[in-house]
Image (cartoon, rainbow, N blue to C red):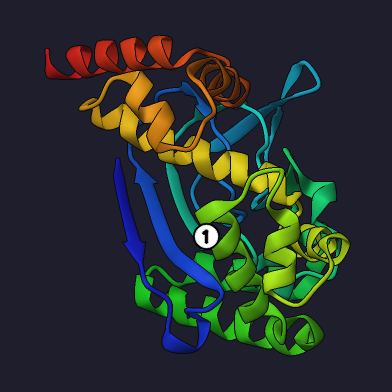
Amino acid sequence: MNFQEFSPSDNLKPYVKCYYTFESERDTAFEDTVFPSGLMEIIFNLGSGTWETYVNHAYRETPPIELWGQIIKPLAIRSKGKHTMFGIKFFSHTPACFLREELAQFNNRVVNLSDLLGNPINRLHAQLLETPDTNKRINLIENFLVKRLAVTEEKNGKVAKVANILSSIKRKADDHTMGDIAFQHGITPRYLHKLINQYTGLSPKSLNKISRFQQSLKLITQNTQPLTSIAYDCGYFDQSHFIRDFKSFTSVTPTAYLENSFSLNQVVLQ
């Protein structure tokens, strides 16, 4: 398997966190679970393999052009065949700059982007299939994204403001400080909630919980601190609160996740 990340051009850096490619020559099936990240993605499938997500008690094949909404609970996936994928990973607050729809409707879903954007995105997909060069693929995608920004320009003026609000939330937010953060940015608490939901598909509280979870996941993976210290460092009230949130996002406790990760590493090393 080969995974690579690429930086966007300067004019798209405020909107795109990175582009990435994923290639797999193995023709073996595997299963995995996707955890909440606080980010939305677009994925172009350019290979012969298939992906499936577990929805409503059954696995369903994902479309050739995938729009990943905000994942808010563990989502099981499985893969068959060989893959070539090109992905666009947006910042938490920037997918709204490219889509007209309310983002919350996509939460915990992988939807067909062709249904939303029609012929323009289908033409882009066809061009990507015909263009094996990665740099040329990035140019095609960036030209498309710049045109989409022009279509949804009414949302673009608030991007910096929303980014600043999110920074404030990540630094010091809890249920009791949203009013202070709203006052700091010259808006009402109600408008703060509306703005964050419009641009991320999540409430400020949910987004902050996912951010803390991602921070804890990184520290657990490093395996250099006890779980009590990780809970404290990530801003949880106590360890039981940490365990409850972690399990809601992964279906397992932090201890079970750490033990499973260690077992998997041992298998790889052997």
Q: Quadrant of residue 263 in the image?
A: top left
- Disc 1 residue type (three-letter): Lys
Instruction: Indicate the quadrant containing the C terminus: top left, top right, bottom left or bottom right.
Output: top left
Q: Is residue 168 above or below residue 71?
A: below
Give the residue at x 72% y 55%: 178
Q: 260 or 28, which is in the foreground?
A: 260
Q: 188 or 35, which is in the foreground?
A: 188
Q: 80 or 227, which is in the foreground?
A: 227
Q: Which percent across, then down, holds residue 93? A: 65, 65
Q: Quadrant of residue 162 in the image?
A: bottom right
Give the residue at x 54% y 76%: 141
Give the residue at x 32% y 50%: 3
Q: 205 or 41, which is in the foreground?
A: 205
Give the left or right position of residue 48, taking residue 256 as reference.
right
Q: In this orientation, does residue 45 appear?
A: no
Q: Which percent across, then down, holds residue 219? A: 32, 34
Give the left or right position of residue 97, taking residue 263 as reference.
right
Give the residue at x 28% y 20%: 226
SS under mark 1: strand
Q: In this orientation, does residue 95 appear?
A: yes
Instruction: Indicate the quadrant containing the N terminus: top left, top right, bottom left or bottom right.
Output: top left
Give the left or right position of residue 144, taking residue 21 as reference.
right
Q: Is residue 258 above or below residue 80?
A: above
Q: Seen from this angle, which residue lies furthest left?
A: 270
Q: Residues within 10 Å of mark 1 (few under 14, many from 20)?
A: many
List the residue tagged with mark 1: 89
Q: Quadrant of residue 41 in the image?
A: bottom right
